Image (cartoon, rainbow, N blue to C red):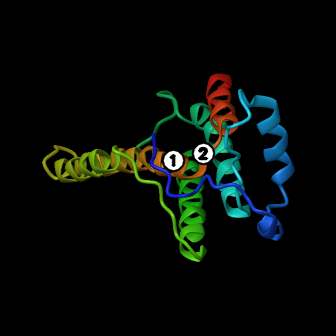
Amino acid sequence: MAKSRGRNERLTPEDSEQRSPLQFIDDFLHKLTAKNTNETKANLSILEWLVYIGLLVFTLVMPFLYSRLTTENFLTPKEFFTKMLVGVLCGLLFAKVFFNKKPQIARTKLDIPIILFLAFMFVSIFYSGNIASGFRDYREVICVMFLFPIVVNVVRARWQLELLLWTVMFT
């Protein structure tokens, strides 16, 4: 589980003007899925809501875009859509980090292994027989690997994880 650096703190009355316009969704889903009264709320900002909704859209669309019958050796429109969506989600997440007064990025024990995996995979491209195919596959792996930091930094409440899992089960 990700280490929280104060990101699950509850809103105080003086922070009420900083509440997101979509806070009522958080309140409703928290009441709907809370197993006990001590569970934390998500308290998402507008950028975090956009990233979370984009993550749900990506999870819904991704399995239908890729199949062995339609994969080509060039960037198809469906691959362009998914790579651009992940790029936009990462951009929104980094914008939230840079524009926040107290930047908080959740760190996990999987950060170093993921970075090492991507580094070794990048080096192995140059030892492969077909370098162009290696770069194409590397782009797809990076697209999927960037979802991990997005999920770790945006999903904070039980209802968010349950909705994401139901989206995966639906697809």
Reply above or below: 63 against 28: above
- Whether residue 92 appears in this view of the structure is yes
Q: Amino acid at mark 1?
A: Val
**Residue 144 picture quarter:** top left
Residue at 64% from the left image edge and 35% from the top image edge? 164
Marks 1 and 2 sit apart, C-alpha to C-alpha, by 6 Å
Residue at 60% from the left image edge and 45% from the top image edge? 155
Disc number placed over residue 155 in the picture, else none: 2
Q: Is residue 25 left or right of residue 118?
A: right
Residue at 45% from the left image edge and 49% from the top image edge? 3
The reply to whether callout 1 and callout 2 are in contact (CB within 8 Å) is yes
**Residue 166 picture quarter:** top right
Q: Is residue 25 left or right of residue 84?
A: right
Location of mark 1 (residue): 152
Q: Extreme left residue here? A: 127
Disc number placed over residue 127 in the picture, else none: none
Reply above or below: 55 against 105: above
